[in-house]
Image (cartoon, helix red, strand yellow):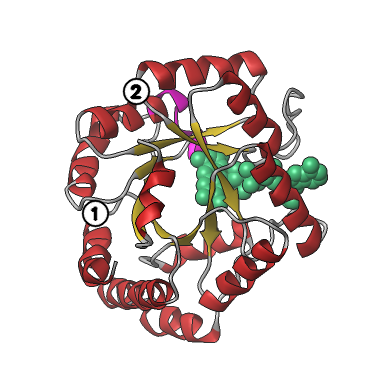
């Protein structure tokens, strides 16, 4: 199903992100998580690609399983910076064989000291390539607090517009902890003529180290209120998890009240946390 059709009734979509198991674990080790997540009836589940040493093949198998066995729409992520056109085409062929219709077209992170392949430089080029191949609905990533490599916020938005013009039909945002950054970003997008739906990426804190690692990677800022919560409960994992869920629910309620197109929950493959948040907001959607 085309995810764009889901936005038509003006309700906020709630969707999930999962990642494939590490190469050392069998693919079946994630099935229990998928079953629980799909049971919460999300609008769709997206599956990351090649991040954290996972096998890209598993992205296809997992996104296919979500769609074909659990009957929930799925999005397969695909990156391009370390791939040739032939490799991307092979991955797209496998997606098609598995009945996957939606892809999140990403550049991927450049590994320091490695020689990236030269077929694709930016996600917009990958987006154009997938559009030319045909048969997919394409989403793109966006950065409310500006992509860490961008020259400045203006050029980042200009580049995002190129991605949308190349064929990205909706956008999913990087995580953020201050909703104002998302609203300001959405306004900048609209002023620049980016009129596609923009989903807000929400990552609940479940442990302090995980959040510090993510934040140092993506450059998200941490509001004082959020830092107080992390510092206060860092040595009490259960309390920190409860506070993290409450903070995420608070963000979601405000986003829904402001009419955001979608909330994309970075579940970190944790169905308990996803369920608590889903149950708190499902009647508001
Ligand atoms: P791009 O859109 O290409 O942007 C990258 C940088 O290049 C930006 O600074 C942009 O301003 C600049 N740029 C773009 N076009 C041009 C141009 N024409 N000229 C000059 N500069 C330009 N990574 C993974 O490895 N696997 C995943 O599954 C994954 N999933 C993600 C999901 C989401 C929702 C998000 C937000 C990120 C995800 N990432 C994933 C991380 C992503 O790969 C990195 O953030 C990467 O550094 C940028 O990818 P992009 O697709 O946004 O790149």
| Front-most of residues 224 and 101 | 101
The answer to whether 104 appears left or right of 123 in the picture is: left
Magenta region, residue range: 50-58
Q: Position of residue 37 (x, y in %)?
A: 23, 48
Residue visible at 77% across and 53% down in the picture: 158
Residue highlighted by disc 2: 99
The residue that label 1 is drawn on is 271
Mark 2 to mark 1: distance in Å? 25 Å
Against 30, residue 89 (above or below) is: above
Residue 54: in magenta span = yes
* Mark 2 surroundings within 10 Å by alpha-carbon count, few (fewer than 14), some (14 through 19), many (20 or more): some
Q: Position of residue 136 (x, y in %)?
A: 48, 28
Mark 1: which secondary structure?
helix
Of helix, strand and loop, which one carries label 2?
loop
Residue beneath the point at 35% across and 76% down: 253
| Ligand 1 sits in quadrant | top right
């Amino acid at each position: 199903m085309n995810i764009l059709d889901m936005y038509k009734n003006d309700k906020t979509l709630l969707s999930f992100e999962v990642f494939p198991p590490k190469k050392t674990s069998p693919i079946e080790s994630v099935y229990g998580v998928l079953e629980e997540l799909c049971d919460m009836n999300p609008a769709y589940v997206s599956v990351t690609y090649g991040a954290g040493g996972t096998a890209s093949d598993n992205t296809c198998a997992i996104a296919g399983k979500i769609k074909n066995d659990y009957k929930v729409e799925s999005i397969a992520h695909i990156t391009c910076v370390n791939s040739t056109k032939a490799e991307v085409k092979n991955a797209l062929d496998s997606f098609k064989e598995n009945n996957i219709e939606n892809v999140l077209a990403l550049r991927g992170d450049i590994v320091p000291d490695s020689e990236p392949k030269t077929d694709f430089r930016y996600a917009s080029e990958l987006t154009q390539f997938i559009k030319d191949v045909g048969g997919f609905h394409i989403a793109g990533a966006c950065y409310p607090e500006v992509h860490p490599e961008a020259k400045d916020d203006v050029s980042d938005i200009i580049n995002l517009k190129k991605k949308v013009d190349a064929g990205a039909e909706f956008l999913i945002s990087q995580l953020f902890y201050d909703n104002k950054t998302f609203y300001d970003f959405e306004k900048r997008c609209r002023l620049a003529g980016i009129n596609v739906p923009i989903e807000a990426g929400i990552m609940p804190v479940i442990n302090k180290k995980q959040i510090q690692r993510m934040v140092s990677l993506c450059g998200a800022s941490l509001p004082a209120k959020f830092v107080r919560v992390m510092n206060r409960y860092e040595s009490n994992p259960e309390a920190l998890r409860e506070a993290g869920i409450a903070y995420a629910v608070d963000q979601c309620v405000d986003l829904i009240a402001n009419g955001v197109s979608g909330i994309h929950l970075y579940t970190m493959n944790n169905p308990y946390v996803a369920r608590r948040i889903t149950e708190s907001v499902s009647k508001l959607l």
